[in-house]
Every structure is written in C-alpha cells, then in structure tokens.
Image (cartoon, grey):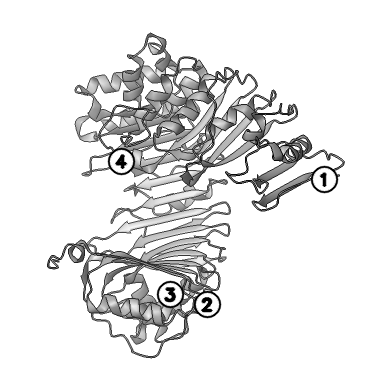
Amino acid sequence: MLKCLRISDGGTASFIIKNQPSLVEADIDTVFSLTTERLLQVANEIQKRDMVRDFLVGISKVIYDYARYVQLPVFRNLYTLCVRFNSYMWEMLPDFLELCPNLKTLVVGTSENPKMVDLTVIARPWNLLSSLEHVDIERPLKGEALRMALVGYLLENSPNLKKLSLSLHDSLKKGKSVHKLTLSLDNAPKKKESDIFIELLNFPRLSSSCQIIIFLNLPTKDVVQTSALSTRWTTLWKDVSGLDLDAEDFYIRETFVSFVDNFLERNHGLSIHRFKLKYDSFYFEEPAGLINGWVDTAARLKVEHLDVSDSFSEWDPMMNPTVLYTCSNLVSLRLVGMGLPNPECVSLPSLKTLVLILVEFTNKWALENFISKCPVLENFCFERSYDDGIPILRVHSKSLLTFMHDAGYHEDYEEEDRFVEIDAPMLKCLKISDDRTSSFIIKSPPSVVEADIDTVFNLTSERSLGIANEVQKREMVRDFLVGISKVKDMSISSSALEVIYDYSRYVQLPVFRNLYTLRVRFDSYMWEMLPVFLEVCPNLKTLVVGTSENPKMVDLTVITRPWNMLSSLEYVDIERPLKGEALEMTLVGYLLENSPNLKKLSLSLHDSLKKGESVHS
C-alpha cells in the first residue's frame, strides 16, 4: 500500500522493493554506495545493475549510468517531475524524459554551488517531448552556457510547450553594458536581461506561444528592436499583450503618445497582461488627463499588472481614473510620484501587490480605505514623501504577508508626529526604514518570520526614553518589541539598537526565543550595545555584524558590566574588512570569549593590511 517513498542516503548499497507498490510520490537521493572506482559496467557489478533495474521498476526514477547498458522501463503515468541538479550534468535529463510519454510539467532546480563530475555524457539527437506543456526553471539564470543549453533543449524539443517559467539573477538587472552571448563556460561575459531573452528567441523551433511569453518579459523597446532581427518576428511583437515603455526612449513626445494609443487600440476587446509607463509630466500638456485616460482604458481591458511612474518631482498629477479602483483582474499596482484621491468606490478583489512611492493623498483616510477594499492583498510597499498628508496610517489586512514602510530622512522635516498601526495577523515579513514616525503599533501580534528594523521612533538626543514624560514612548517601544519577538531572521540598524539599549536601562526586554539569525548594521562605534540584545536571544545560531564605511561617535553612555555566555551561537560573520582598530578587535574578542560553542568565525582584512600600506580613512 506504499504511496510515498523518500530516500536520502549515499551509503546504503542496496534498496530492494518487494511487492511493487503503486507509488504516488517519490523523492530519491542515493548512489547505492557507488564511487567512481565502482562503475556499473564492471563485470562484478552485474548484481548491482540488476538491483538498480528492480529498484527503478519499483519506483519512478532513473540512474543515467544504468541506462547506458540496460533498457529503462517506461513511466506512462508520470505527469509531474521535479529534478534537483547538483552538477552541470543536465544532459542526463533527456534519457529519462524520453521514457515519460505523458509528462505535462517539469520543474528543474539546481544547487547554488554546482560541481563538476567525471561522468561522460553521450551526445545524440533527442526525441521530441510532445506531451510537455509546462516547464519551470527555478534557479535564477546568469546566462551561463550550460544553463542556456538546457533551456534551449527544452524549447526546441517541446512542440506543444505552453509556458516556460524562468527568472534572471539580480546581477543581470542592474543596467550593465551589453555583451555578445557566447557558449563558452569559462570567462563567460555578464549579460543583461534582454540579452538572455533574445538568445532564447533564436532557437529555430520555438513555438509562437512561447515567443510571446518571452516577449512579455522584455521592455517594449527591446521587443520592437528584437522583432527587426528576423522575419519570423516582424509582426509577432504586435500580439504581445503587454506594454513596458519609457518616454525617454522617444525623441518626440507625440510619438510616445501615439505608440501608447495604438497599443490600447490594437488590444481593444482583449485582455492585457501588463501596462507599464515611465514618463516626466513636465514635458506633457495636461498630463493628468492623458495618463488617467490611458489607465482607464487599461483597466477596461482587464489589465493584470499596472505600473505608472512620473519622474517629475515638482507637483503630483492626480491619478483619478474612473475604472481603475474597481478593476477585478488587477493583480499588482505600482504608482510613483502622483496624487491619489479618496475614491467613493473601491473594489479590487484580485490585488495581491501594492507599491506606492512618493504618492500624496488628498484625504488622510484615503489609503486606509483603499487597503481595506483589497481582500487578498499580500504585499504592500510604501515609500513615503515627507508631506504625503497621512499623519496616521492604519494597515488593517487579514491577508497581508509582507509590509515595507520607508519614510527616509529629511533634515527640514518639522511636521507633527506620525503614527503607524499594523493589524495584520498573517504578516510574515516586516521592513521598516523610518526615523520620523513616532509610533509603530502592532495589533494582533503576528508570527513575523523575517524583520528588518531601522527606526528611532522620532527620538533625538534631547528626547531620550529616560525622561519622565517619555513613559508613554517606552510603553510603545515595549509593545513593538513584543509584537516582533517571534521573529526568526532579523536585520537591525545600530540606531534602532541604540533605542533598544536605552529602553533596556528602564524596562526588561522581551525574550526573542525564535531568533536564529541576526544581522546588525553599525553606523557608530557603539558596538557595546550589542551584548544587551544578544542576551535576550537564547537560541541565536548566526550573527552577521556589518559597519558603516564612515563610523561616527555618539553620545550614548554604555554601562560596563560582565556579559553572559552566548551558548547557542555557532556562526559569526564580521562583514566589514578589519583594519586592526582597537574597538574592532574588542568586538572580535568579546564574541570569541563568550561563545563556547562557536564553530566558525568569518572575517576579512582591509586591503591596506594585505599590501603593507598605511591605513587611510
């Protein structure tokens, strides 16, 4: 009756499956105790080959080396396959795929540290994978030759492929210079996002449906330019149901306007996947009416992903389309540099991601009302301007998983205190970067898994927590710390740590029993504050200590006392290269002396110490 089998064992020589079960799920990671000296083709390994054959008949997996000597069984009932690679030997995959005549979905994962192996792969023409419809390449691509060859094989040999899902490594998305693609593994050049997709488009048997999926991941400028490279793509770009346009790419503004109008007209009566515009309203007459009209039309076309960005900072045109706020298909909304009204009717039943950057509001309750009408909202990122018109922000959401609040820093800011109230019982990730908000209130404390905290709760050196009239502030800090005390992974700035330290001098800190990984960013030499917090993290395993390139001295007085042992700490990483300064070495000494179970300490030396040069700040 066995339905699920999981094996993770490199040492066991034999797995024997009797009474062949009708397995539904299997996860296999074993080499049957084989090494490079004990290959399956060796004469005395016939018994081993027979065992592997019987094992494969009993389950739905394959060993490539076995397949070179004995015919593999056919897996007619296999519809979904997940493969994890820990080497570059993806060429083994086709042998097994050809034995899965009804495979519909393939998920390919790879190790972050792939290794080279000695197995020789026989190159031969591969059969078509006629049944395959969905492929997901989980590991972000960097454009490496072998990874592109894997994608190419799947694209060229899957005539009925409906969807290819892949992502690109962050290093490809930073606007680096364009390099010609090569198939050389060694010294492979860096590639941009558009380069990767253009190479994918060059596979000769790529179906039209897959071409459109790839085009949807390209800026419209690159789509049009790519279409000019082949007669196969001359008109295909017009079928792409997405627009990603930057007005800076047009010498004449009227051409930009005409291009957007034509796109919307061409998709009249259809649905569009993405509508993304970036422009500078300074160069347009009546930009608010123009943009509102476009957004209104996109909403009527049931747009799924809407991104509108105005780079002109002097004034904010009002985003007030009549249909946008009731667009039932809208999944993600990103608005930059504009004003929002308090719409009478908001209904966004599909909206999962909301990003607002430097957006101003005509009504202080507008955003609260907006969020409350998004029943499946999961991600909310709010990068605030200093005068956005919201003194009190209430984020009430039963579905919210991630909340990012960034208010930056403005020296001229003299507005009254701001308050943020978070009532999100499902919240898993919280990121705060805000020196100006006075109070963060967490209601219905969620089980936050990850947090990044950089705030001083609008405190200054003149308004310390010890002053009598700051009792209310101390209570707020206490409640905030209790609200995040279940976090497992946390990053914190030294300024926030300073507030916590000052608070600990008057009230007992809550215990962070679930905290296993802590990253601290120091912008001062007050690392002595760190032990106070470490002592309330009894299960901390990993500590990463970073420091600013230009550390500053602060006036906070640290009370010297004996520190408790950090019994749970196993890994410490001092990220900033050490120059041998006294305070740096004191920190290292403290961690070494008080961590009896420390397994690894990682640190690096400043270049000036490696070359025998004098230290310069």
Q: Is residue 518 visible?
A: yes
Q: What residue is shown with label 3? A: 477
Q: Is residue 392 visible?
A: no
**How far is the residue under mark 1 from the one under mark 2?**
41 Å
Q: Amino acid at mark 4?
A: Lys
Q: Residue at x 70, y 52 (%)?
A: 12
> Do callouts 1 and 2 mark residues in contact (Cβ within 8 Å)?
no
Q: What residue is shown with label 4? A: 174
- Categorize mark 1 by other alpha carbons within 10 Å: few (<14), some (14-19), many (20+): few
Q: Identify the disc placed on residue 2.
A: 1
**How far is the residue under mark 4 from the one under mark 1?**
50 Å
- Residue furthest to the front: 43
Q: Identify the disc placed on residue 163.
A: none
265 or 189, which is in the foreground?
189
328 or 459, which is in the foreground?
459
Q: Amino acid at mark 2?
A: Pro
Q: Earlier in the sequence, mark 4 or mark 2?
A: 4
Please provide percent x and percent y for residue 44. Answer: 71, 40
Q: What residue is shown with label 2? A: 538
